[in-house]
Image (cartoon, grey):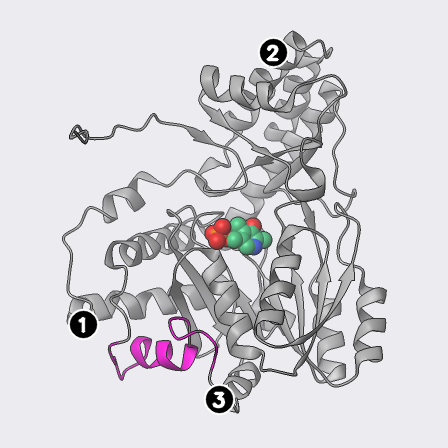
Amino acid sequence: MATTTSFNPPTRILMGPGPSGAHPRVLKAMTAPILGHLDPEFLRIMDDCNDMLRDVMGTTNRITLATPGTGTSGMEAAVMNLVEPGDRVVVGICGYFGERIAVMAERAGGQVTRVQTAWGSPTDLAGVEAAVRAAGNVKLLGIVHAETSTGAQTPVEPFAKLAKESGALLLVDCVTSLGGVPVTVDAWGADAVYSGTQKCLSAPPGMAPLTMSPRAWDAVKAREVPCNSWYLDLSLLEAYWDERRAYHHTAPISMVYALHEALALVLDEGLERRWARHEQNGRALQAGLEAMGLVLHADPGYRLPVLTTVRIPDGVNDAEVRGALLDRNSIEIGGGLGDLRARVWRIGLMGESSTPGNVLLVLNSLGKILREQGFKADIRAAVDTAAAGLDA
Ligand SMILES: *Cc1c(COP(=O)(O)O)cnc(C)c1O
């Protein structure tokens, strides 16, 4: 017999690489009655979402919407619509997600050049520049703004300049940065930018904000062969999200409510204030971890405030520590991905999860568990140092 009792999940403190905790107003919005996907009231909030997304993403691009599906759907929509068979693509890879862009571009039939940088450093500009020149006639240059796998941030402007000079379009993955660190699409001069609802926007996983510059949209419209994906074909999606309202798929109604509420919360807080909050909490956590005696993994000067990678000390058991944090403190942090598996922890301070209380709690809880594991964590120094940063 299948169980028929309802599921009552524990309340976790989500401090991993995503999802982050959702604001109660966002969860409440999801319990609102379902509307038809062509109901005028529903269409109105879809339009509101697009307007708010433009503000949050720093763009006036007409093509600004949210694709159905998690952050990866935004990546796939951007790549599949912009890359045609034979197109030259250069991807700057400094972690797990850059590689995912490259794999998708290959699946779209692109001729892909990968420029690899050590995991923990920002994407190497000189290397990408050389690859773009060597390849010639590059259609798309892809980078990841905030590499969630490594905790490193890549400054976007120099890549936008390079793309412009070489006639390429610039694709930027902002899944982890949007709503947490400055994302200014038009000021950067980026052409295709996508994100996800579940990181610093603090809505549940399920949609992916996406924007395209007029130049990128011209490239989509000039395709000789249709996009490889039907579901994420932006020409079809656009006809649903714009005034034509042509049925394409049934919008994930409750997720659109959630996105709408989450974006309203971001704009109510104010982008500058929100960025400053993430910055302060992230730097306090990082200073606290160092004061505890731990070593941060990402290059100084390029550390993301929203996702901190910290090295696992020798002799400490990765899974036991994360398990104890979850069992005893109900705190989730992330393990390492790919090359960094069992070498780092990933501690997120995204959206609703980015609070001074969470900074102090994770330092105290992690410190105690590390001491049981034989690592001499200086908990007092960690908490005092972080608290000083939070007071500043
Ligand atoms: C999380 C993440 C993704 C993928 O998003 P999903 O919501 O897991 O599909 C892509 N890029 C980056 C940088 C991410 O952090």
Q: Secondary structure at mark 1?
A: loop
Residue 235 position by quadrant: bottom left
Q: Are there few (<14), some (14-19), or many (20+) residues within 10 Å of tag 2?
A: some
Q: Are there few (<14), some (14-19), or many (20+) residues within 10 Å of tag 3?
A: some
Main structural element of the magenta stretch: helix, strand or loop? Answer: loop
User: Can see residue 210?
Assistant: yes
Magenta span covers which residues? 227-247
Residue 256 position by quadrant: bottom left
Pointers 2 and 3 in contact (C-beta within 8 Å): no
Q: Does 103 sit left or right of 263 as displayed?
A: right
Pointers 2 and 1 in contact (C-beta within 8 Å): no
Instruction: Name the residue beneath numbered marker 1.
Output: 38
What percent of the width, then of the height, locates residue 251? 27, 65
Residue 243 on the magenta segment: yes
Q: Does 52 sit left or right of 40 as displayed?
A: right
Residue occupying image coordinates x 45% and y 42%: 19
In the figure, 234 relative to 115: above or below?
Answer: below
Residue 4 is labelled as none
What percent of the width, then of the height, locates residue 338? 67, 43
Q: Secondary structure at mark 2?
A: helix
Residue occupying image coordinates x 72% and y 12%: 375
Residue 353 on the magenta segment: no
In the figure, 363 relative to 107: above or below?
Answer: above
Instruction: Name the residue beneath numbered marker 2.
Output: 368
Instruction: Name the residue beneath numbered marker 3.
Output: 221
Q: Quadrant of the N terminus?
A: top left
Dot 1 amino acid type: Leu
User: Can see residue 392?
Assistant: no
